[in-house]
Amino acid sequence: MKKLMLGGQTIITGRGSIAELAGVKARRAFIVTGGSAMQTSGVIAKIESLLKNAGCMTVVYGGIGKNPDTQAVLDGLKKMRQFAPDLLIAVGGGSPIDAAKVMGLFYDYPELDFAKAQAGELPLARKNLKFIAIPSTSGTGAEVTRAAVITFRELELKIGLKTPAFIPDMAILDADITMTMPPHVVAETGMDALTHAVECYINRNLDDFTEVLAKGAVAGLFTWLPVSYQDKTIESREKVHHYQSIAGLAFDNTGLGMAHGISHALGGKFNLGHGLLNAIALPYALEFNAQDQAVAARLDELARSIGKSGWQGFITAVKELNQVLNIPAGLGSAGVNRAAFENGFAALVDNCLKGSTRVNPVVVSVEQMTVILNRMYEGL
């Protein structure tokens, strides 16, 4: 038996759908966001205006970085408790949404802390706090998933905390907001979404429902991501925004693989963007996993869905897409210093074997991961 959860209560789509906030019933809204993009674009001001016109007070907690850590969550939690909201709104990329997920649950359950969260002692539902997620980037699927990825600085590792209580009640997919994304963010977040869909599709926990979602997301992203990157049309931005959320629905019910295990470890150590690291890692992960006959057959199916032939053809298509999106071929060309890469390398290898690598379709040894990481550094 398998229990599927396809997001929260509602997914709102369509240009201008942020206007749905005008009908939300709440007294005090705590708004979590990233750097300055949502403020300078006027999105935060529009959200505050919609809420205030509906009689809801607001306060904004900004500055969440690309790899939110435990301290950012705790700082936000302190401000939440001071404001005492009944509505939580996360606006921006996956980072502020993930941070807001943990803030909201810790707010509803004051006895919770990160030690209990790491031990898996998380409740299955929020108590009273309503939660709305409005993604401005197209990649993480955080608005529909039960995972929150938080960086533990002392461990140099990003850890995925999981509970259905993290799933927002409402996800608003407003393509107008995505028009603020610069090309490199389009590329990196889009490849994050593609990695979600591909790793889901070759995961051994795949089922009939997630198979359709994942394959559809792969085909859609291969078609529309290059257009979104190169031409910045509203149609392409909307398509990618939808397909990334579909990929999120798929992997949230299935699982991922070693590309994500690697990117979480590298992100925790080098503070590079998650999507960038996934894009670099994905071809290496697929080449390794294709030694398994069942995985090779799955990749062959994906190849046919994008007009290519054979599992090798699919991996080549991923590499070519990275080139179109100007993704570096290796960690060295992405800016990782060789000395920093080699310092604490054994611990890095160990961290790469944790997380999603544990559910990789092919078991990975220390020796094999060592080879993969060294190839990734050189871009070979």
Image (cartoon, rainbow, N blue to C red):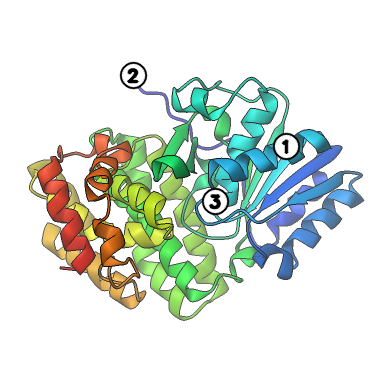
Q: Can residue 374 be seen in this view?
A: yes
In the picture of the structure, the residue carrying the numbered disc 3 is 95
Amino acid of disc 3 = Ser
Number of marks: 3
Is 135 or 367 nearer to us in this picture? 367
Residue at image coords 52%, 68%: 237
Image height of 365 relative to 196, above or below: above
Badge 1 local density, few (<14 within 10 Å), some, or many (20+)? few
Amino acid of disc 1 = Lys
Q: Of the residues under marks 1 and 3, which one precedes in the sequence?
A: 1
Residue at image coords 45%, 75%: 229
In the picture of the structure, the residue carrying the numbered disc 2 is 1
Residue at image coords 92%, 44%: 55
Task: Tell me the element at label 1.
Answer: helix
Task: Tell me the element at label 2.
Answer: loop
Name the front one of labels 3 and 2.
3
Quadrant holding the C terminus: bottom left
Q: Distance between the residues labelled 3 and 2?
A: 32 Å
Badge 2 local density, few (<14 within 10 Å), some, or many (20+)? few
In the picture of the structure, the residue carrying the numbered disc 1 is 78
Amino acid of disc 2 = Met
- Whether residue 327 sits left or right of residue 17 in the image: it is left
Name the front one of labels 1 and 3.
1
Is 154 or 211 nearer to us in this picture? 154
Name the front one of labels 1 and 2.
1
The picture places residue 292, in percent across and down from the top left corner, at 9, 43
